[in-house]
Image (cartoon, helix red, strand yellow):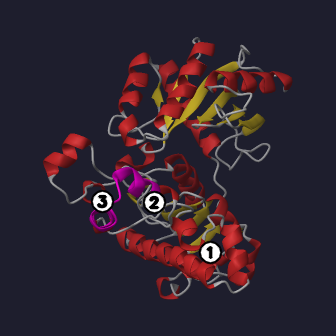
């Protein structure tokens, strides 16, 4: 068994999980999915980092708190049994298309990518820098949200704008939530009955406060809904998703909005929140049940966008073996799953109402050509596995 600490460092929070991973065929403590034994030794979340009145002044103090929590569980950061640390990094740009052993040069290159993810990469880097100071003897690996989508073909990744401008500023479709899409698409592929010669075709719908879709052909991502930033694509909790770019110019000309205000509008005051005042799908659905027209419209817009992407990705893939719902909304909202797939029976997509209400495993009807499933995601386990793969290759090299 190999002991790996996974760190997901945000701007004001630090999520961690300590895993013991082996090459067996079982699972432990909810972290196994038939792809090798994984036992969760400890996990937790440090919040309010750097906020007024918080006892956690910075990411250094946060990792000190993590170390203390791990020590109380009998396994501190300074333990000689710890093999490696895996870090989530949101944006790898064109530089990083696979998990990468962190060196000073790699850290500098991640820093240069901050303009592509100004809200995320600085926090990811802060966690990396502190962890490297605490355990400079350990291999540490960056696992990039964008890496899984690097196989998207040029026709899907390229925006139809001036080529020289796009090249100069790195403008293309990168995609996000890659660790989740990798984990879920692989787990969902195992449910396919009769995959084609290239392997199963899977549509993954990762639905949380942030939401994204991907089309995966034989294990390779060929299309994804998020683009240069996590703003494009599906309707989200506070983000608009797809919007006519002309809206931005219209708001600038007619409303006098500066770039910062437009950015705030589309990222923080749109989506479900902008449509009905609630960004929590549970609250929205309570209002839908009570007959609230604003909540009903918000829910309808959300599900219409989902259905449109399912149809588009069906066309991209040609055939679909499995549609997988994951994330907080995907795993828990039977109403979203029902409405998103309603009317797609001609495509061989048929839900079983009872199974959908239960919300576990396969939820499609017996005669459905396409299997529909609820597949809980596990990004920390995916990061740990990719970290183990990197250090194993390094050791062999």
Q: Nearer the viewer, mark 1 or mark 3?
A: 1
Give the residue pinned by disc 3.
156
Which residue was labeled with disc 2?
265
Is residue 221 in view? no
Residue located at (42% from left, 61% from top): 225
The kind of secondary structure element at disc 3 is helix
Which residue occupies 44% across, 47% down?
148
Q: Quadrant of residue 25?
A: top right
251 within the magenta span: yes
Q: Which portion, as a residue range, is magenta?
A: 248-265
Q: In the figure, 58 relative to 94: above or below?
A: above
Q: Quadrant of the C terminus?
A: top left
Question: Within 10 angstroms of label 2, few (less than 14), some, or many (20 or more) residues?
Answer: some
Label 2 near label 1: C-beta < 8 Å? no
Circle 3 or circle 2, nearest the eye: 2
The image quadrant where one finds the N terminus is top right
> Within 10 Å of the Cα at label 1, are there few (<14), some (14-19), or many (20+) other Cα atoms?
many
Task: Give the left or right position of residue 217, taking residue 88 as reference.
Answer: left
Depicted 185 relative to depicted 246: above or below: above
Please give the residue where the numbered disc 1 appears in the rendered image: 336
Question: Relative to 121, is 252 on the left or the right?
Answer: left
């Amino acid at each position: 068994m190999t002991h790996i600490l996974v760190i997901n460092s945000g701007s004001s929070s630090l999520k961690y999980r300590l895993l013991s991973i082996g090459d067996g065929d079982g699972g432990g403590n909810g972290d196994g999915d038939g792809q090798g034994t994984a036992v969760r030794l400890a996990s937790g979340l440090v919040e309010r980092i750097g906020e007024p009145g918080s006892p956690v002044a910075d990411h250094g103090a946060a990792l000190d708190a993590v170390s203390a929590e791990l020590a109380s569980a009998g396994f501190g950061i300074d333990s000689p049994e710890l093999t490696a640390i895996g870090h989530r990094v949101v944006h790898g740009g064109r530089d990083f298309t696979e998990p990468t052993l962190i060196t000073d040069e790699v850290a500098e290159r991640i820093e240069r990518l901050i303009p592509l993810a100004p809200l995320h990469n600085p926090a990811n880097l802060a966690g990396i820098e502190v962890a490297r100071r605490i355990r400079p003897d350990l291999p540490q690996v960056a696992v990039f949200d964008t890496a899984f989508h690097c196989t998207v073909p040029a026709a899907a990744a390229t925006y139809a704008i001036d080529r020289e401008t796009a090249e100069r500023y790195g403008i293309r479709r990168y995609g996000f939530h890659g660790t989740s899409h990798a984990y879920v698409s692989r787990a969902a592929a195992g449910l396919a009955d009769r995959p084609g010669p290239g392997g199963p075709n899977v549509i993954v719908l990762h639905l949380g406060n942030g939401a994204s879709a991907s089309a995966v052909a034989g294990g390779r991502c060929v299309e994804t809904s998020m683009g240069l930033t996590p703003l494009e694509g599906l309707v989200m909790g506070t983000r608009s998703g797809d919007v006519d770019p002309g809206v931005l110019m219209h708001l600038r000309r007619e409303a006098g909005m500066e770039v910062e205000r437009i950015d705030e509008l589309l990222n923080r005051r749109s989506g479900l929140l902008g449509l009905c005042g609630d960004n929590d799908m549970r609250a929205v659905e309570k209002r839908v049940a009570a007959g609230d027209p604003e909540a009903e419209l918000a829910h309808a817009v959300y599900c219409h966008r989902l259905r449109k992407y399912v149809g588009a990705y069906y066309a991209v893939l040609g055939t679909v073996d499995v549609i997988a719902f994951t994330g907080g909304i995907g795993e828990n909202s039977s109403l979203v799953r029902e409405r998103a797939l309603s009317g797609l029976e001609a495509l061989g997509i048929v839900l079983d109402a009872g199974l959908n209400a239960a919300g576990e495993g396969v939820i499609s009807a017996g005669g459905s050509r396409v299997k529909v499933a609820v597949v809980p995601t596990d990004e920390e386990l995916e990061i740990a596995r990719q970290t183990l793969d990197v250090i194993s290759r390094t050791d062999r090299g």
